[in-house]
Image (cartoon, coloured by chain):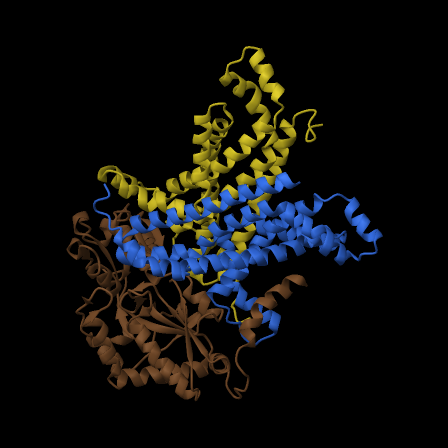
Amino acid sequence: MKRSYMIGLALAGALAAGPAGAQGLTGTLKNIKETGTITIGHRDSSIPFSYLDDNQKPIGYAMDICMKIVDAIKKELKLDKLEVKLNPVTSATRIPLMANGTIDLECGSTTNNAERQKQVWFTNTHFLTASRYVSKKSSKIGKIDDLKGKSVVSTAGTTNIKQLTAANAERGLNINIIPAKDHAEAFLMVETDRAVAFVMDDILLSSLVAGSKAPGDYVISKDAFSKPEPYGIMLRKDDTAFKKVVDAATAAIYTGGEGQKIYDKWFTQKIPPKGLNLATPISKELKNEFAKPSDSPDPDSYK
Amino acid sequence: MNYNWNWGIFFQPNPMGTGTYLDMLLSGLWLTIKTALLAWIIALICGSIVGVLRTLPSKTAEWIGFLYVEFFRNMPLLVQLFLWFFVLPELLPRAIGLWLKQLPNAPFWTAAIGVGLFMSARVAVQLAAGISSLPRGQKQAATALGLTTVQTYRYVLLPMAFRIILPPLTSEFLNTVKNTAVAITIGLIELTGQARSMQEFSFQVFEAFTAATLMYLLLNLVVVTAMRFLERRVAIPGYIAGK
Amino acid sequence: MFSSFDFDVIRRSLPYLFYEGMTFTLTLTALSAFGGLVFGTLIALMRLSGYRLLGRVAGLYVDFMRSLPLVLVIFWFYFLVPYIGQWLTGASRPIKVGAFSSSLITFIMFEAAYFSEIMRAGIQSISRGQPAAASALGMTYSQTMRYVVLPQAFRNMLPVLLTQTIVLFQDTSLVYVLSITDFLGAASKVAQRDGRLVEMYLFAAVVYFTISCIASWSVRRLQARISIVR
């Protein structure tokens, strides 16, 4: 068939790369060994987890952790050289792209929950955050019920938009929910008065506010749509061998004090591109988790 | 293929509390149809005016028509939607801009107008071609009968031209339907948008997109059948398309 | 009115916009146009081959692709192509394709449907006598196509093919939905990072407009020249 021949041709490049000879390895590890490359999915505007700096290179807290994981994989596979490829993802594309093999690790701000575990796996938690909303002080939105009948934006494909949708249906708020492509776009909708509020994880909201033109104009809600939920770095489902390596790597980083150092670098010091300081010291819960790394999707297990 | 197929997903309740996932897709289909129809009305009205302008003897009118078509044809639809949605309200006086932005259905109106204007340039080109394909004698005969320019267009040229260009207009209407999907970038949750949110909520990527694909095919089929019927009804006797 | 605007943001991001964004857009456009033309010509030949089954399959493919919005097709392929790769190669897991190759495959497959219709019209515009003469000279089917029919069809349809390529150039902006850094993607990333939507989107509009205008003006010139020769 000519059509399949065409696709085959296009894919030939992908296949031709790298010598074989990775006996005993399976799944992602085998793939990395054979091709000598690993593909990392990164975000555009998940500050400070994974975002683009002034030169449009992805940087951030989760990116740093991922680079450590890459080092561990390199050591595990005894490779001299491991090329890291970067693939931009959005909240909406990250899960299908993980499932279909486009990316091997997703380094960003992905909430680890039981529902998602049916599709993908997560390594040890690297952050805990609750779902809240940001609005302009001038619009005087004190509580979730004040959103009634208004336009509210959230990022497509997040747990937050799901929680907002559920709350909307449950409480009969009649909110007009606008899905945005990424966090920056969603925040701009609030900044330009397209929407009165943006529902997102509070840490992302406070970084967006801090980096905005007039941080004093905004307020983050006390009301939360969820308990503090864990963020994890995403891996492909059913790849036990790969998860073992990544889990061991992250556990070593978190228990060895390196996790704390990376945390401090991104949350308590000035970060590029604007020299922002988020001034968010590590929470008690995360500190406990770092001492005893866990990949549990259950918010209640992080007490 | 390590993918969990679940075709029953369509009959499970969606998280919006508006029924099942299938209802969610159907509401998207309905929004696609509504947006496409409104856009098409705008495209026909603006396109006709500009198409006529392009065939008038006046040089100025011809230029205006030319510039209009070039403006809307030489920019990606996506960029045009961004201009209407993000840029325009900022350029207007603050109060008007704010009013525009807080319209309850801003994405819908922006999409309909944006896609409508984009398509109007194509309608204008088709119509101008249709008018100039008519034998010169028709216009001359109309003038000889003492019809004014407006009357000539209203009673002689346009009824003929529109019937001649009906087949290309059908495909332009289908393009309008398809182009409404671009509006997911400004937050319009039409059929493609609903398929995408269904994928995000249920993780059943391929089921969601398959259903949306089938709905687009069906919509296409309905439009094509309806237009064939219309073409036969209004066919001009003596032309190849007529009997 | 423009006093609060910061047009300097454009100057600062120029290298990124053009070096990364526009390079991606133009490469994607050129390769998809080429691939779409080759594949489209094959489809056109299948439709005109006289084998009913082959013609039906090609016809269905064209109708199918032309019924779907490009945005939907882009999503489909981005998620599906690795699985197709796995199925074709018999690999144990999905093949890694990547953003660029995936968009390239998408646009080739999608545009082929449109190019094939143009090529079909081009092939049909050639008088029956020519292939008849070719076969009288003892040429095989593929020789007739290669040396007689296709070069003329291509030449006659060149302006239409180029116009379709301009449409393709504009359509590549839709990879924006996948957060890929094409020209518009680059502009929107800068716009969102610096909160400068107005400046960046206006600039993107001007750039697309200028390029498309110059291109379509050149096509018109070419068309005028070709029609004189004929």
Image quarter for residue A184? bottom left
Is residue C158 in view from this perspective? yes
Spot occupied by residue B54 in the image (x, y as percentages of width and height): 49, 29
Q: Is residue B243 left or right of residue C196?
A: right
Q: Residue at x 62, y 49 (%)?
A: C63
Chain B colour?
yellow
Q: Nearer the viewer, residue A249 or B43?
A: B43
Residue A230 placement, left or right of B78: left
Screen quadrant of the C terminus of chain A: bottom left
Write the residue at 50% across / 17% down: B149
* B238, above or below C117, in the image: above
Q: Nearer the viewer, residue B112 or C131?
A: C131
Q: Quadrant of the N terminus of chain A?
A: bottom right
Q: Please tell me the colour of chain C.
A: blue
**Residue A256 appears at what percent x and percent y?**
26, 86
Output the letter for the chain in brown.
A
The location of residue A251, given as percent across then percent down, is: 32, 83
Q: Residue furthest left?
A: A216
